[in-house]
Amino acid sequence: MEVLEKLKTTRRKEQELEQLSPFELKNNLIDLAEPEKVKKMAAQMLNAGRGNPNWIATTPREAFFTLGKFGLEECRLTMKDPSGMAGIPQKEGIGKRFEEFLRSNRDMPGIKLLKQMFTWGIKEKGFSPDEFAMELAEGVIGDQYPTPDRMLKHTESIVHDYLIQEMCAGQAVRGGKFDLFAVEGGTAAICYIFDSLMQNGLLKKGDRIALGVPAFTPYLEIPHLARYDFDVVYIQGSAKTAGGKSNFQYPDEELDKLGDKSIKAFFITNPSNPTSVEICDTCRKYIVKVVKNLNPNLMVLTDDVYGTFVNGFVSLMRDLPRNTICVYSFSKYFGCTGWRLGVIAINRDNIYDHMISALPESEKQRLHKLYESLTVHPERMKFIDRMVADSRQIALNHTAGLSLPQQIQMMLFAAFALLDKENNYKEACQKVLHNRFNIFWDGMQMPVEEDPERACYYCEIDIHEWAETNYGEEFVKYLEKNFEPVDIVFRLAEKSHIVLLNGGGFAGPEWSVRVSLANLNEDDYHVIGEQLSETMQEYLHAWQKSIK
């Protein structure tokens, strides 16, 4: 009786906690996985809940620090005081001085990348040597406000090429180039986009939007905040493979919902989080068909941070350039979450500018008054430039923009990938994740189907699907009657000191868990696989015992 009462208490506690975001629930799981007695025993907690990678890109960082030496030398040319004070870089002749710096420091870390990037920028992209070198020197020193405030000129050009290579499979986009806005990571990008869509009357409180699920938890939460209170239509990724397992692609009947013109915007993570799969070609083409034929003014926001982990990845920014706002963060691929580096991309020919120009006269007058302190022709302001102003409450637009050192590191990351013609870094990153994926499933002792759209950054395990496929509906009913969907993550934390996130918190299958394959060592994933499998078997044994 006492054991049964303890189970009831546990279920009540689990019912309370499963209302939390998975990222908040994680803190409670960490407390279970690493209590004081465990710490004293030096037992190892395996936290596969957060997607912070445990690798970094070294070469572009070495280039950044070496570039800092050049920046300081330039500052000391104009003023050198024993107190530690120096001047600021001067443009005249700086291109030649940078070339001399590259020659005389040929053995410094990262110098090869700096030389390749500078030569490529001048010869292939037509940059002025003095202007390019000046941006590098001022940028790494950070002695000026960002100018242009949206993004530095040469940095934008290089990052643009990087996005075309990585997000568009290197193919030119119909409609031409994209304007970029450098921001403080993907987090800031999402905040800025939502706020500017509202500020400019493109979305209004209570509007209907669509959300591709499963999804990154904040995308589930933001639309329901009081300031937005959107009417959310969920586009459920639930298609099955030939083997009967979920591959989390979107069935046609789900994508057909996007044809409803009452839906103003569609938000999606691609490849997805937590399922870590790219939208397949068939689904992407179907989305394009639905939007173009039925809902041509649908605003599409795609977060493509994991795109670099899938070979030949294609973002919706390529196939629906006029409709799509692309958010890209450098954090995962280059191991730089602490740098806070992201970019918003909007095609120069886009529906946002056209829809603003078609707003009712009363709305145009409101917006004219809003932005009139910035330009004598507010009606001509691009949506992306309005976003820059909105990010600093308009009145502080003159100090808007991502810090210069952040933009220079972003440029070096992008140039590093562009100049890596053999894709050595990409192959190394993908190999790490695929090895961990295979080791995890080896620990689970379960076969796994090949999936060319799989990014392998996360792994989603559907306990419900496993139970029904292998043991039938009665076992599923037993699980639902006797346990909460989050029970398994609590068991793993308390028994095995392993932290995973509950898939239900991402609007995925309630009885599922997400394993981050980015932040632990290979052997750890074998342990996690074994312990997860063992815990699943405990449910099976309990059920088998109950029916004897």
Image (cartoon, helix red, strand yellow):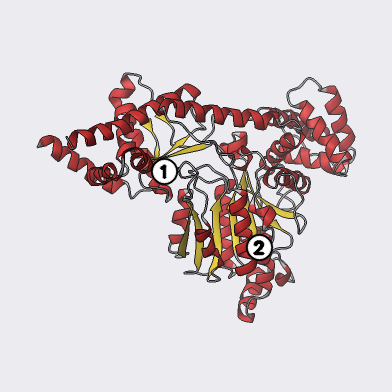
Give the percent coordinates (x, y) of residue 273: 50, 45
**Residue 35 location (% of width, % of height):** 30, 28
Kindly identify which residue carries mark 2: 386
Marks 2/1: CA–CA distance: 32 Å
Which quadrant of the figure has residue 65?
top right
Label 2 Cα crowd, 10 Å radius (few <14 / some 14-19 / many 20+): some
Q: Are marks 2 and 1 in contact (CB under 8 Å)?
A: no
Q: Is residue 462 above or below residue 374?
A: above
Q: Residue at x 29, y 40 (%)?
A: 487
Seen from this angle, which residue lies furthest left? 1
Q: Which amino acid does the dot numbered 1 rest on?
A: Phe
In the image, is 498 to the left or to the right of 62?
left
Left or right: residue 167 compared with residue 53: right
Is 233 left or right of 163, judged from the image as shown? left
Viewer can see residue 80: no
Q: Which residue is mark 1?
A: 23
Q: Which residue extends farthest bottom? A: 361
Along the viewing direction, whichever of 382 and 99 lies nearer the viewer: 382
Q: Is residue 342 above or below residue 230?
A: above
The residue type indicated by label 2 comes to Arg
The C terminus lies in which quarter of the figure? Answer: top left
2 or 1: tag closer to the N-terminus: 1
Q: Position of residue 354 (x, y in %)?
A: 69, 70
Dot 1: within a 10 Å radius of its alpha carbon, few (fewer than 14), some, or many (20 or more) residues?
some
Instruction: Name the element at disc 1.
Output: helix
Residue at figure coordinates x 23%, y 37% from the top left: 543
Closer to the observer: label 2 or label 1?
A: 1
| Secondary structure found at label 2 | helix
